[in-house]
Amino acid sequence: MRVRNAVLALAVAAIAMGAGSASAVEFHGYIRAGAGGASKGGSQVCFQGPGSWYKFRLGNECDNYGELELKQSIYKDESGVEFFFDHMWAVPIGGTFETAQTWVGAVLPQWGGATAWIGKRYYQRHDVHMIDFFYFNTSSVGGGVENIDVGFAKLQLALFQYGAGGRDVFWAPDLRLTGISLGESAGSLEVAAVLSYLSRADPTGDLPDLDDNLSKIGPVLLVEHTLPILGGSNKLTFQYGKGNWWNSTNGGPGLSHKDDYQFRVIEHLMFQPSTKFAGSIVGTFQKVARKDVATGDDTDKYSAIGIGLRPMYYVSDYFLLQGEVGFNTWMPDEGDSVTLTKITFAPTLRPIPGTGGAYYTRPELRAFVTYGMWNDGATDAGVASGAFGDASSGLTVGLQAEAWW
């Protein structure tokens, strides 16, 4: 089955590339792949602090992964009305092809260019590339209308379903206002509100009675300010999730205590003041509190802080030096704190920067050396999968390619 799926997907992709100009098929994709080892022997292991939702990814990714996307216009008339189909495979290398997106959209000029859509899709995800963290991601099966011009902003309306086929299903209306201008020098705002509602089917009456504590409704709120600066942008995000969608990120809602919550602040600066020099700075703060649904007892309370820097500099047209320093600390209300520092140096081959600037230029071929060091709390929690035993530091080396198109 794996071989058949792989051959089918590659055949479709090859047809799309070969016939792209004639049939207007768009072909997009992403890949990261590489190999590495650890100073203690064996394969590369990755440094990620227990309790952290992300890791600093340069020279610190242990998976091989790809995505293949095809987009085809299937109807278009003289008035400008257009219907199109979009499909994407997620390709864990060595695994099976999985459908990441498959949806149909309709662009209607009489709606000011707004797009109606239904299907499974990645929906207007917010992420920090440096840490591969999708901090606002409601993607699932659903439908909606996006980019509705309301004058001062664009309105995005959607409805998603999670847990289809099960006895616990969540419905989530998603409302956003994007591109709210604050003036030429003050940037723009995005505000979003998602409300997750739990629908339980219990025809046999055998589900546990959790009504006193179980969250029926879970709000997710987001406010994000974007300011163009230093050839890039600065994004400051405030985020809050409560109840069944306390984590306020990807994965969707789940059965949770009504008092569970998370508050998050993310500061992300991407700078590229010249074609030779670029980089990223990120800082995160998270406060989490969770309770047992059955008993109401506290189960998890902690704060987490992360800060990191990735600078890069073109030594010549196709060769640059880049590095990354990242620090995470996880501070439970009870017990020892966990700290982890990761440092990477990565000489890299990549194309000359285009009009989009140096930071997101791809593809890249890079070698890397990564050093991690951590405290006793992280050792006890099994940082780096325990591959370094009771040591408080470790080194990995390797090669990696990354591309998107």
Image: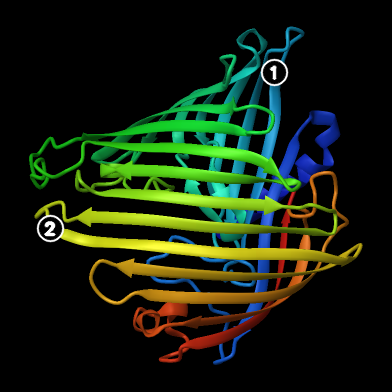
Closer to the chain start, of discs 2 and 1, is 1
Quadrant (top left, top right, bottom left, bottom right) of the N terminus: bottom right
Regarding residue 146, the answer to whether it shows in the image is no
| Amino acid type for the residue under numbered disc 1 | Tyr
Q: Quadrant of residue 77?
A: top right
Residues tagged 2 and 1 counted as in contact (Cβ below 8 A): no
Residue visible at 85% across and 33% down in the picture: 21
Regarding residue 184, the answer to whether it shows in the image is yes
- Per the image, the residue denoted by label 2 is 297
Residue 311 image label: none
Single out the mark in the foreground, 2 or 1.
2
Residue visible at 59% across and 47% down in the picture: 89
Position in image of residue 168 (x %, y %): 25, 40
Q: Is residue 25 left or right of residue 262?
A: right
- Closest to the observer: 25 or 360? 360
Count of number-bearing discs:
2
Judge whether 225 appears above or below 315 on screen: above
| Amino acid type for the residue under numbered disc 2 | Asp
* Mark 2 crowdedness (10 Å alpha carbons): few <14, some 14-19, many ≥20: few
Position in image of residue 240 (x %, y %): 36, 43
Q: In which quarter of the image is residue 2?
A: bottom right
- Closest to the observer: 165 or 314? 314
- Closest to the observer: 118 or 281? 281
* Mark 1 crowdedness (10 Å alpha carbons): few <14, some 14-19, many ≥20: few
- Per the image, the residue denoted by label 1 is 75
Report helix, strand or loop for mark 2: loop
Position in image of residue 220 (x %, y %): 36, 38
Judge whether 295 appears above or below 55 on screen: above
Position in image of residue 122 (x %, y %): 54, 40
Report helix, strand or loop for mark 1: strand
